[in-house]
Image: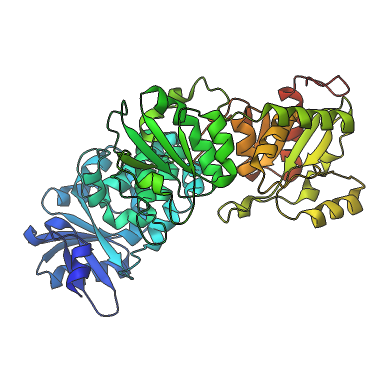
Amino acid sequence: MTTSDRARFGPDSLLVVKQGNGVFLLPPDAKQVREVALLGSSGNLDNLAVSARAAGIEIQDTFEIADPFPSARRLLAVAKRFPIWFVADDFPWIRTFWRAAGDLAEPLLAAANVVQKIDNIERRRDPAIAAIVGGYEVAAGSVPKPELARDLENLLRLFSFARHPLSETDSCLDTLSALAPYFAGIAFAHLANGQLPRGWWLYEASKRRELRDGKKPFSQPLWAGEPPSGESILVWRNAGPGDEIVYAQVFNDVIAAGAKLFIEVDERLVSLFRRSFPEMTVVRRETPPSRRLQQSDIRFQATFASPCRYFRRSLEDFSPQAPYLIPDPERVSHWKQWLSETFGQQPVIGISWRSGSIANKRFNHDLLAWKELLQRRDFAFVSVQYGDCREELDALRAATGISIPEPPDLDLFNDFENLAALLSAFDATVSIDNVTSNLAGAVGATVIQLTKRFGHLTLGQERSLWYPAMSFVFPDERQHDECISEVITKLESELIMSPGTEKHR
């Protein structure tokens, strides 16, 4: 073990190394402990015993995880005399035990100490914790909200060695270093559960650790919620343009609070952002970054989601919302004319069923599965699916006879100005969660978004809090035919129409 490896875990931590069993990070107070009780599965009890003995600590009692569970009262009686150690691998069982312990769970938590097993010092990824927070949609949907809130709080308190509620500060982040690889997953579980302050805090912490080409993108200090009035703040992104679109919803609030914003944005969004936020300085993202963004008149830097930590701390902070991206009026008129000339008075629905995002690809849809919707004669449909989708459109026509046109002379991947105008000219858009549906929502268009119920941007709601005219359908909860039937019902409701009536546009 090198000096740098030890320093990575903090000077107050004690490392015990055993050949073949990886590295064990003991609690910070282990140097003062002389006696402990151990709790865990049989294999981990052996590892705990090895670690304790290597540190010169006497083992006074052991509790093996089994069915039935150990007696919570007996465990608590021992905990009043000795600290209780358990390995992070056993956290899923500990979570179940807490629920069974009832009123005894809180005092047991106060006595528990995580011994972090680290198989790979560089990555420090524990598979048991990853299974909980990496699949945050499952975590958020598996238990009622109050129980999930308690589970997440206990997870953080255990790993921070805290015996009181955590504060959302940088110093608390230091105590949670063992969970750093999972900050994003834990944050998403909080957000999906509607726990916004804790969620934004950990989400920002996860993004702070993302570098651009291995370096900090800018020299300014990170904005930590200092009063924005009179301050200049540079905002940059970590993910794709979809994130830039959704998080831009809060920018008008930051400007109203007196801040001067400098926004580094995808070049496809530059002109749209400049029209929509004339008070901001909008700069195209490039490598290396623009020199303008390195100048000393900019005091702070922040990620795109950072303002949400201070301006979207509750669900009520989102209401009421209005469209905040403004498409070019001339382009909107052009596309309305094309729609009218092509489809007459039929309501026209834009459709998009795939995402280019690696994270969202598992939610892509097979276009043929939408045939119940697409064969409706009272709607017309236009594909706004970016990328090469000709093969899918041809397969749909061959299988069903349904022909879906694409907008002429429009590069759906690169021309966001014309895409925004077209989306605002549609009567509605049906899409999965991708840049197209987010752009449609931001310009105020009617959107039916097929998305995961416990995605972090749904915030546990049935309708979007980000966009005024977006509602959700959750395909992960039903069969395809049921899902598409719900889309049709929502379309009829959102357009305030019944089949055969004149469209509202």
Please indicate whether residue 471 sits to the left or right of residue 60 in the image.
right
Q: Quadrant of the C terminus?
A: top right
Count all numbered tags in the image, as a single digit: 0
The residue shown at (61%, 32%) is 441
- In the displayed structure image, the side of residue 107 where residue 443 appears, left or right: right
Q: How is the image coloured?
A: rainbow
Q: Nearer the viewer, residue 373 or 467?
A: 467
Residue 73 location (% of width, % of height): 22, 46
Instruction: Tell me residue 440's x, y (percent).
Output: 65, 34
Looking at the image, residue 491 sits to the left or right of residue 501; the answer is left
Specify whether residue 454 is in view: no
Identify whether 27 is placed above or below 484.
below
Q: Is residue 457 left or right of residue 128?
A: right
Instruction: Give the image quarter of residue 334.
Output: top right
Q: Nearer the viewer, residue 21 or 305?
A: 305
Task: Judge by depth and name the residue closer to the eye, 6 or 22.
Answer: 6
Quadrant containing the N terminus is bottom left
Image x and y of residue 13, in percent = 16, 61
- Residue extending farthest to the bottom is 19
Residue 106, located in which quarter of the rendered image?
A: top left
In the rendered view, would you say 259 is above or below 211? above
Q: Is residue 479 visible?
A: yes
**Residue at point 74%, 43% (across, down):** 384
Q: Residue 449: where, in percent of width, then height? A: 65, 37
In front of the other: 47 or 319: 319
